[in-house]
Image: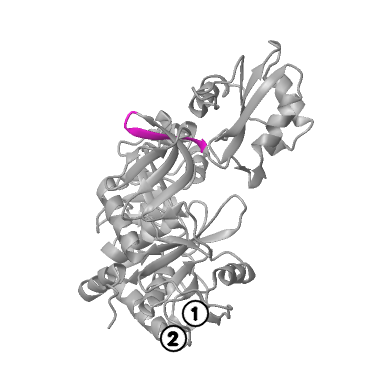
Amino acid sequence: MSTTPPDPLLQAFDRLAATRAERPLVAGLRAVATVGEIDRVAAALALRLAAAGWEEETLVGLSAANGPAFLAGFLALRRARFAPVLLDAGAPSTAQGAVLGLLGARGRLAAPGGWAFAPERWELTTLRPAVPAGVGREIGAVMLTSGTTGSPRGVVAPSAALVADDAQLAAVMGLAAADRMVAAVPFSHAYGLKSLAVPALVRGSLLLSAETPSPLAPLHLATAGEATFLPTVPAFLAAVARLAEPPALPASLRLVVSAGAPLSAEVSAAFRERCGRPVHVFYGASESGGITYDRPGGAAERGTVGEPIPGVEVELVGEEGRVAVRSAAVADRYLPEPGPELAGGRYLTGDLGVWKGSELALCGRVDDLLIVKGKKVDPREIERLLAALPGVREAAVFGVPAPGGAGRAVGAVIAVTDGELDYATVTGFCRERLADYQVPRALALVSELPRTARGKLDRTALLALLDTSARAGA
């Protein structure tokens, strides 16, 4: 007799289906899918999966765009006792297959579109790994992430962790079943899964999901559906703030949240001024769920990512201040190989942080490798080049928010012996020798690089120098 406890996510949805089957769960501009419709499709798909001959408690890829298809496919896999590996629906099937092969998945379940979710339209593909990866019945999802090498890793999250994260986020953000959520963040990403898909499945919150995605579809849906909650990313906020005439936000919208990448103070302020809503910063990770949240809004303008979410323990480890997290929402382990940073209910992130009062400020990454305009940048390479410029004693190079707030850029603090060095001289020297994306966009010239008592570079002080002296040149 199995001692595995019931899946809390499935239990919550089954209660919803039993009591609120006619409740709309996903709405577009032209179509609506109810709890009951999604439940019936999931049941039919689960039967197809059971007949596929795949071993239970193994990995199966889920490829479905935002919409009722993702919810139905996710439920079907869990009911058939498979662990869904959440795939980017826009990726080629060959790329999806390569990832699934690396993880040892047994098959793939794919929908032709987010709203094309009739049971007969799904494609089941059998994979034949040498040894199918077994993960246990309690696993709710496997989310994909990658390190600086770009090699994919699977983050194995129990259903209990997904439900715990949802409860913590709902409490701190004030979210409830009646909320109407703009579903512009992909459900296959940890941010979209935990902020959108799980609340819909657990509480029945309405997802506003466009049948045909477009750049401004989230704002059109927000107005048409009288949205209350818009979780989004800095690039979207920056694009809206740059519009000559941004669309008016509906009066119903009470919460705009930014996560997934650093939000600059400039973009936060511009969106608030142009659109009349503060942006609330949310910091989390695939491995841990939510870490900190900015209840009052405007944390980016204060240089922080908010306070620890109740129920989440945040510790800064070592002199460098590496962010470590403990909570009931922390994932179980990595696939295909475990990693010491994720074990025993604790996740040691790659982020470096400092406390600003009760709020956390992020000031860099342990690995230091930067991603600028989609390309990898080695700070050490740029530091060596700068050291060759006459008048430079030493340099520290690291990532900063890009001008305009979209993505990351290179920043440099340079200790100089020649008082005549200036921004134009340094950047001109770099432009002759580096690709454009490698050239520093933020620059501070100082007599000495700040260091800690142990002689290590003081990252907090370095960032402060850029904040006060670099932006005019950027």
Q: Is residue 154 left or right of residue 149?
A: left
Q: Is residue 22 visible?
A: no
Q: From the viewer's perspective, is residue 277 above or below residue 461?
A: below
Q: Nearer the viewer, mark 2 or mark 1?
A: 2
Residue toward you, 367 or 16: 367
Instruction: Look at label 2 and name its amino acid.
Output: Arg
Q: Which residue in the rendered view is the most extreme toward the left?
A: 19
| CB under 8 Å between discs 2 and 1 | yes
The residue indicated by pointer 2 is 48
Q: Which residue in the rendered view is the most extreme toward the front?
A: 454
Q: Is residue 460 visible?
A: yes
For numbered disc 2, what is the local secondary structure?
helix
Q: Is residue 461 left or right of residue 178?
A: right
Q: Let me know if residue 361 is in the magenta part.
A: yes
Q: Which residues are magenta?
A: 357-364
Crowd around label 2: few <14 · some 14–19 · many ≥20 (10 Å): some
Residue 448 in the image, given as x and y percentages of width and height: 60, 16
Q: From the viewer's perspective, is residue 462 above or below residue 281?
A: above
Could you tell which of marks 2 and 1 lies nearer the N-terminus? 2
The residue indicated by pointer 1 is 122
Q: What is the C-alpha distance between the residues marked 2 and 1?
A: 10 Å
Q: From the viewer's perspective, is residue 373 above or below residue 329?
A: above
Picture quadrant of residue 181: bottom left
Q: From the viewer's perspective, is residue 4 above or below residue 431?
A: below
Task: For the C terminus, give its image quadrant.
Answer: top right
Residue 105 in the image, given as x and y percentages of width and height: 53, 74
Q: Is residue 20 left or right of residue 273?
A: left
Q: What colour-coding does the image apply?
A: one colour
